[in-house]
Amino acid sequence: MSSVVERTFAVLELLSTVPDGLSVKAIAEHLDMPPSGAHRLLNQLVQTGYVSQDRVQGDYGLTMKAAAVGMSFLRRSNVVEIAQPVMDELAQATHELIRMSVLDNGDLIWVGVSQGATVGLRYDPGEDQGVVAHLASSASGLAWLSTLDDDAALMRAAKQGFQTETSGPNAPTGAADLLERLAETRKRGFSMVIDSFMPGMNAMAAPIRHPDTGLGIGTVSVAGPSVRFVAERMEATGPLLLAAAAELGQMAFASNFFRRALDPATG
């Protein structure tokens, strides 16, 4: 990392994944920085109020100020506000977890959620909001990749890798496997993944498209436990999901954030 700005945001992004905080040594090792440089940067972040230090353990962690910046932006962008009624309606109809992702600076980020499962097994999405979706293994990623041509889709997926440490046993094994899944997704209109993004979880997703150009600007997904949300249920849910995605696409112009995502220069 060559600049102070890059190192600063790398520290903030790392700490956002570890709520209990990390030591200077751990932060330096994670980011391949000299411990002395990491210490100076952390002290500056403490002074600005974005990071605090545990006086007992000495570890550094994010403050609520960092979270407040993101929440303030989301609230003022109207992204979740305009989408929530559509997500809630889909959650009530499917009795499963609904999530919405948006495209921002080339990344697909989960920002909205509605929980439709009220009894029995259910997937808790609490840690996913604000997280960049894994393109190759998640239903949301696969749905958005399907809006690109094969070369562009493979290039995007390859940057992240076809699997993660937490991927399920049915995650794509390589380029040929991914291309086959993309072809099926385009033909169907929505993606379906079984034990791919996470063991024990199945999901489906449809792209949210620009109403004029058809460019993918986000996705809406339905996810549930694999023992309950089986392939037959996903197929039957397809029309509801596609209708929700189309409605969200028509709402895109109501948010400045979506209007920015529609600009090819930002995608």
Image (cartoon, grey):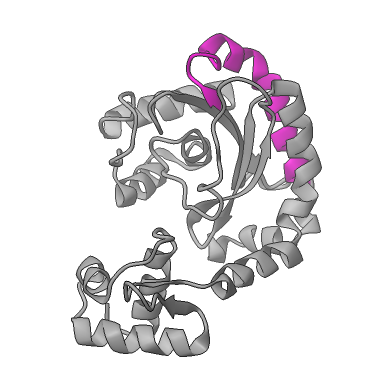
Quarter of the N terminus within the rendering: bottom left
> Residue 74 occupies which quadrant of the picture?
bottom right
For the record, the magenta segment spans 224-250
| Camera-nearest residue between 7 and 27 | 27
Q: Can residue 191 be seen in this view?
A: no
In the orientation shown, which residue stands out farthest toward the top? 232
Compared with 249, 181 (above or below) is above
Q: Main secondary structure of the magenta part?
A: helix
Residue 231: horizontal and vertical position, in percent?
52, 13
Please tell me which residue is depicted at 41% across the width and 43% down the height of the picture: 153
| Camera-nearest residue between 169 and 19 | 19
Please tell me which residue is depicted at 53% across the width and 52% down the height of the picture: 109
Residue 40: horizontal and vertical position, in percent?
31, 89
Give the total of numbered labels.
Answer: 0
Please tell me which residue is depicted at 40% across the width and 47% down the height of the picture: 152
Please tell me which residue is depicted at 36% across the width and 45% down the height of the picture: 157
